[in-house]
Image (cartoon, rainbow, N blue to C red):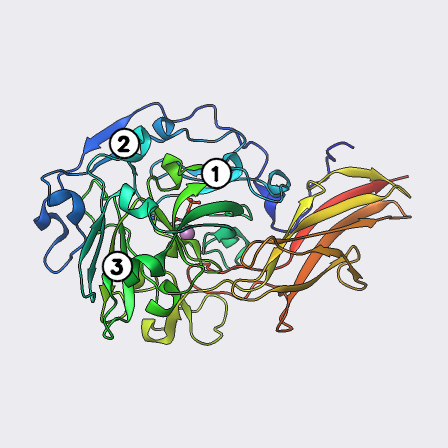
Amino acid sequence: MQKTGHKPSFTDWHKTAPDTTRRDFLTTVGKTALLASLGMFGAGCEAVDRGLLDRGLAPVVLEDPQAAGLPKPDMLVHSEIPFNGEFAPHLLNDDVTPTERHFVRNNSGIPERAVNKDIRGWKLVIDGEVHKELALAMDDLTRFPQVTMEVVLECAGNGRSLFVPEVSGTPWQRGAAACSEWTGVRMRDVLQTAGVKSSAVYTGNYGEDLPNDGSEPFSRGIPIEKAMDEHTLIALKMNGEVLPAAHGFPARLIVPGWIGSAMQKWLNRIWVRDRVHDSEKMSGYSYRIPAYPIAPGDNPPVEDTRIATAWQVKSLITQPQSSLEFRTDTPIKVRGHAWAGENQIDKVMVSTDFGLQWQETQLIPPSNRYAWSHWETELTLVNRGYYEIWARAYDNTGIAQPFTQPWNPKGYLGNVIHRVPISVVA
Ligand SMILES: Nc1nc2c(c(=O)[nH]1)N[C@H]1C(S)=C(S)[C@@H](COP(=O)(O)O)O[C@H]1N2
Ligand SMILES: [Mo]
């Protein structure tokens, strides 16, 4: 098999994928101690590192991705500060995504504590609508029952580069999705220890990655029902190891089925609120989608948007790699993953004739709820020519992936069918 010289014309992974390893990687090291003074974030913003400030310690945020082992080998780097990078679909073929192949999505720098794996002074504060405020050290957290689950983690903006008309934001292709194994404690066990008041509506989650420019830190929240769901974790390990610096050491949220931005990294505060969390990243168009279908390019009033929560059904073709050349009458192994937010995968169909005919694939069920399913099949093409392998997943509610991407202003929740071009020669 070889790469073809042929350049398919539609917009997809292969458009920009090739040169994935950056050699001219950032050399300037920006290391800035953060002056985490209360006044920095302006009146009314409680987004401070309470656990640390109480002890007179301020977190230090590094703007040095290399210190955190970034970029990972073969990564397509979108930006260095903040660091954002993903992998080509054929590099995501593993059943459980190795840490080395998990995309990274940061809104600001990486806390120095995470880089140094330094737990000193770290506390997880639980406050707000609780009967008893908590400040838990790592030793306190490890005393709760530990749960291990494989969970798909996917950035809300994955697939953004496929939106027409183009939208602004990190131009994720298809690789800002992964399914690693996460170990940690149930968020509800911790919240129950604090005693959730009946006034609790939502959480406001905070991390240690406070921006050095004094802008409001990245903070999002989840409804109290999702926080109390048995599958929602405060993860302490990824693929059996303490969390890597880039993925949230020492603790992060895992909110299965939901967009990645719900999964706060470098977690140090869960503020239980009596209203929907109203941080900057919960407001305006941030992580919000139109409440009704809009015309491509339209910008609906913010009142007509809703918070993006769970993913809808989607699939990824991880084999074959895009643009390979095959021989006629030789079976082609086709494989990939499929997942569906809060729903289950029912079947995955493939087509090689632009959707005229479909063939069902063999489905391998997920290891646990919220892990991705795998699917595979063999295709034999008898005539030479240009083909596209299309995959279309269906969930248990009968919903399938769209053929054309429905549009929204920020390019969220893209789940258009994946198309992999190949050529067949006699
Ligand atoms: N503290 C903090 N948590 C965060 C973010 C962040 O910038 N800061 N990014 C979020 C977004 S948008 C995504 S998609 C996931 C990415 O997780 P990963 O980098 O482990 O893949 O983390 C989420 N949690
Ligand atoms: Mo994200």
Question: Residue 61: image x %, image y %?
Answer: 24, 36
Which quadrant would residue 291 be assigned to in this image? Answer: bottom left
- Which is nearer the N-term, disc 1 or disc 2? 2
Q: Secondary structure at mark 2?
A: loop
The residue singled out by tag 2 in the image is: 118
Q: Is mark 3 within 8 Å of ligand 1?
A: no
Q: Quadrant of the N terminus?
A: top right
- Which is nearer the N-term, disc 3 or disc 1? 1
Instruction: Indicate the amino acid at tag 3.
Output: Glu
Between circles 1 and 2, the one closer to the viewer is 1
Regarding residue 403, the answer to whether it shows in the image is no
The residue singled out by tag 3 in the image is: 280
- 158 or 123: nearer the viewer: 123
Relative to 106, residue 419 above or below: below
- 109 or 199: nearer the viewer: 199
- Which is nearer the N-term, disc 2 or disc 3? 2
Q: Secondary structure at mark 1?
A: loop
- 298 or 247: nearer the viewer: 247
Question: Residue 87: image x %, image y %?
Answer: 54, 39
Question: Residue 252: image x %, image y %?
Answer: 36, 48
Crowd rating for badge 3 (residues with CA inside 10 Å; few <14, some 14–19, many 20+): some
The residue singled out by tag 1 in the image is: 240
Crowd rating for badge 1 (residues with CA inside 10 Å; few <14, some 14–19, many 20+): few
How many marks do you count on the picture? 3
